[in-house]
Amino acid sequence: MIEDHREAFLYVVFGAFTVLVSWASYALFVWMGIELNISNIASWICAVFFAFVVNKWFVFESRSTEPTVVAKELSSFFGARIFTGILAFVLFPVLLFIGMDGGLFGVDGFPARIVTSLVEIALNWVFSKYLIFVKKKPDGDIVGGIEDNDPNENEIAE
């Protein structure tokens, strides 16, 4: 079963690791005395760098090192993450304002950080799967992207 949904399974696993990188770096920054919103921004930057590497190489198996391909993936990835990052920057203080500023696990504002991360994960999967790391068949047709109309076709024909 896992092999049938390998990509989704790996996205969830590496997504969890990305969240851990984000949360751990957030906690570290807060414990260092850095203001909550600055800690939030810095932890997001750490997580985005980690996420690009694991999504490119392990989840979506984009092994191309061709400069134009890497540049397109990198710019698309960061563009999508900037969009969801802006959303998170807006959402986080709103959540703090409406009362999610309490502590969890000894870290102030952690409940707001959790909710923000869940929203980011969902949107980032959509962008990565359908816009950024889109696989092509040898005939040029796209598999798994927006243009793919066959939901049962998961593999690239070799």
Image (cartoon, grey):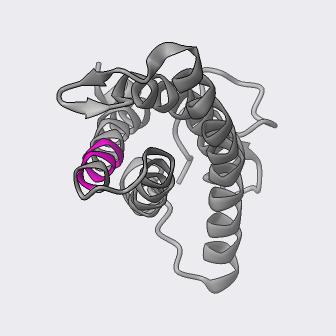
Q: Nearer the viewer, residue 81 or 108?
A: 108
Examine the structure image and report whether residue 23 is included in the region drawn in magenta: yes
Q: Main secondary structure of the magenta part?
A: helix
Inspect this view and state whether residue 136 appears: no
Residue lying farthest bottom? 67
Q: Residue at image x 77%, y 26%? A: 149
Q: Residue at image x 60%, y 83%? A: 66
Residue lying farthest top? 99
Q: Residue at image x 45%, y 25%? A: 112
* In this view, 155 is above or below 136: above
Inspect this view and state whether residue 33 appears: yes
Where is residue 49 drawn, in percent x and y?
45, 64
Residue interval drawn in magenta = 22-28
Q: Nearer the viewer, residue 127 or 7?
A: 127
Q: Is residue 6 left or right of residue 38?
A: left
Residue lying farthest left? 105
Examine the structure image and report whether residue 12 is included in the region drawn in magenta: no
Where is residue 108 drawn, in percent x and y?
32, 32
Examine the image and state in which quarter residue 84 appears. Answer: top right
Q: Quadrant of the N terminus?
A: top left
Q: Residue at image x 68%, y 39%? A: 130
* In this view, 93 is above or below 45: above
Where is residue 127 drawn, in percent x and y?
66, 41
Q: Nearer the viewer, residue 99 or 7?
A: 99
